[in-house]
Image: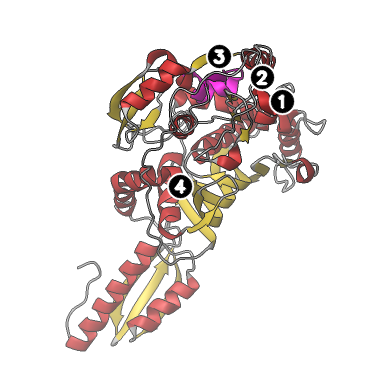
Amino acid sequence: MTATEPATQFQYKPQYKPNQLICGMGQTAVVTGWSVKTAVAKQLQPQEYAVIGQLYSPTRGISFLIRNLLANPHVRFLVILNATKEDKNAGGSECLLDFFRNGFVAGVSDNGRDCWVVKSKITGYIDIEIPASALERLRQFIECQEAKSIADAVSIVKSYAQRGSVEPWGNPLQFPLSEAVPTVLPGTRYGHRIEGKTIAETWVKIIHRIKTTGTIRPTGYDGQWQELIDLMAVITDEPTGFYFPEPNYLPIDRNFLEEYISQILDDSPYREGVKYTYGQRLRSWFGRDQIEQTIQKLIGEIDAASAVMSLWDVKDHEKGGSPCLNHMWVRVVDNELSLTATLRSNDMFAAWPANAMGLRALQQHIRDQIQARSNYDLKMGPLITISQSAHIYDDVWQHTNLLIEKYYQKIIDLEQKQYYDPVGNFLIEIQDGNIVVSRTTPGSGEIVACYSGKDPLRLSREICANSPAIQADHAAYLGIELQKAWLAIREGLNYVQDR
């Protein structure tokens, strides 16, 4: 083979996530970050590259990428595209570059698992099951270059292909991969409602619900996910400026959020390799600024039920790559501005916290603009997200188990100490040998319903049937108190609620 003939005798064989990769016959792997991999592949011949794939997350994606490289030692060159603001914000490409530039050290992941940590300002993990010696061999034998544009990446790949064939650095290497197997309890598949004061606490409750009763099914991108269908999350009191817990257990931080919010609020020009941003779809995709339309609609008709924004294009059915966020509508009820958003597909672990905070920022923007341009002084109402497919991918199941173990019960215990239920309160007494239950409003204490009888089971069923939104812990408490009242009648004892 001459120096000008590209290598063609190799075949890349991915061990992990094969359906997410474009495989070729050369010796150069191309990591495109958040840029669409086909934007690079269409400008190359299969014999010029070994594999082309995207890298979204430094904590979830780098370890699989390295495992695939170890299993394909004929790959001797690596081109890492680090071109867009999405790449800068996520940090995956930068962290991978730092692995080859700076190396790694032994450490612990944010879920408490032993791992290798990339020496980088961007947090990145590699499975501890991969020996350090194998990682060092990759760093020694693979030549790595950064590309700042798609054209730059294509040029570098072609230059590598012109070098001709290079001997593989060794034999294929594979190492054990620990996997979490969830225990799924029976539960409703369709239609779930989860409420919390902040996005952070609501997120933990969402993760718990999916991990407890979600259906396990294969994904279209290799692997599995655990899924609930039609999950509605209601956030009632997210503060201005957003709440981040200490320590921060969310998968995002304030620096990431600032850039992400701009992708929702701001328009952006078309860029090769980037599908779209939500802001582009809202501001200019359909030839109208839908955010501005919504503001003007509500200023002109504050009670309007038609302040709707849509990101779905009918052409999305044909070309794929359709937006996960589909529709939003804004309502003003009792001087309170709420925003409801529907998402067709939602990664509840990695994406939902950013989705929710970005939508809350949009909600705040609309409220502030209405106030600045009119005499309305609106309060911020709830944010509601409806996720048609609410799922968690299998590569974070271990992380979610530890998250639930550490934080879920603390959040629930704190909520239960507040003793608040929107359906009201129930006062229980014994009168003339009967159990009498008065239902009162949660604010003024006005009696709105009364139930009477001797059978605690019948009473509890009647009350719950007439209060379908009663909180589960409140219903359990009610059952206990009704049983105590029945025992007091049977034994001739005095009954006082809560004693």
Q: Circle 4 is placed at which residue position?
A: 394
Residue under label 1, please give it: 45
Quick one: SS at disc 3? strand
Mark closest to the chain's N terminus, 3 or 2: 2
The magenta segment is 76-94
Distance (Cα) linking label 1 and label 3: 20 Å
Q: Quadrant of the N terminus?
A: top right
Q: Nearer the viewer, residue 202 or 182?
A: 182
Q: Which comes before the other along the chain, label 1 or label 3?
A: 1
* Chain-order first, disc 4 or disc 1: 1
Badges 4 and 1: C-beta atoms under 8 Å apart?
Answer: no
Q: CA distance from mark 4 to mark 2?
A: 38 Å
Q: Residue furthest front?
A: 1
Please state the horizontal and vertical placement of residue 448, each as a whole percent of the image. Answer: 47, 69
Question: x, y (%) of residue 203?
Answer: 44, 44
Residue density around tag 2, few if under 14, some if 14–19, many if 20 or more, within 10 Å: many
Quarter of the image for residue 298 reads top right
Residue wearing tag 2:
6
Decide: marks 2, 1 in contact (CB < 8 A)? yes
Question: Marks 4 and 1, Cα distance to the nearest angstrom?
Answer: 33 Å
